[in-house]
Image (cartoon, rainbow, N blue to C red):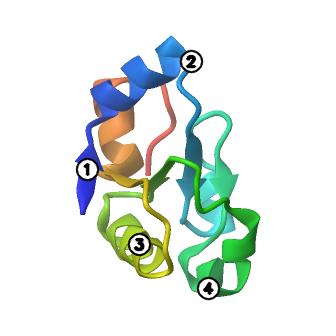
Amino acid sequence: MQEITPRELKARLNRGDRLVLLDVRQDWETRICQIDGSLNIPLDQLGSRMAELGAGEEIVVYCHHGMRSLAAAGALSKRGFKKVLNLTGGIAAWAHEVDPAMNQY
């Protein structure tokens, strides 16, 4: 599975790269913090909601620490999504490395 670091993701967002940010955490977690512009599909709903994603889009999947997103990225890849990246360390690493003012849990 391909990974992207928080700093690499930030640089790509700053460049204006077209990425789908897929947050696979539960709704209550997204109310605490999230990366702007993210689409929230909790991991337990991903199978029934994959049609909301384009198979040709580049998708960066994230969760709290990176484990659920790794499972989600694997599921997407198995279903034919070719450009899937897992955010290393999840939103916790994003907050630590990119946005220290972000609420954390």
Question: Which residue is at 30% across, 69% downward?
Answer: 67
- Residue farthest top in this picture: 15
| Among the two numbered marks 2 and 1 on one chain, the one whose residue lies closer to the N terminus | 1
Amino acid type of disc 4?
Answer: Gly
Question: Spatial distance from mark 4 to mark 3, Cα to Cα?
Answer: 12 Å
| Among the two numbered marks 1 and 4 on one chain, the one whose residue lies closer to the N terminus | 1
Residue 86 rendering spot, x and y as whole percentages: 34, 55
Quadrant in which the N terminus is drawn: bottom left
Amino acid type of disc 1?
Answer: Glu
| Among the two numbered marks 4 and 3 on one chain, the one whose residue lies closer to the N terminus | 4
| Tag 4 and tag 3, C-beta contact below 8 Å | no
Question: Spatial distance from mark 2 to mark 1, Cα to Cα?
Answer: 19 Å
* Left or right: residue 71 compared with residue 15: left
Question: Spatial distance from mark 3 to mark 1, Cα to Cα?
Answer: 13 Å
Amino acid type of disc 3?
Answer: Ser
* Disc sitting over residue 26 in the figure: none
Helix, strand or loop status at disc 2:
loop
* Disc sitting over residue 47 in the figure: 4
Q: What residue would you read off at disc 1?
A: 3
Q: Nearer the viewer, residue 45 or 79?
A: 79
| Among the two numbered marks 4 and 2 on one chain, the one whose residue lies closer to the N terminus | 2
| Tag 3 and tag 1, C-beta contact below 8 Å | no
| Among the two numbered marks 3 and 2 on one chain, the one whose residue lies closer to the N terminus | 2
Residue 7 rendering spot, x and y as whole percentages: 30, 25
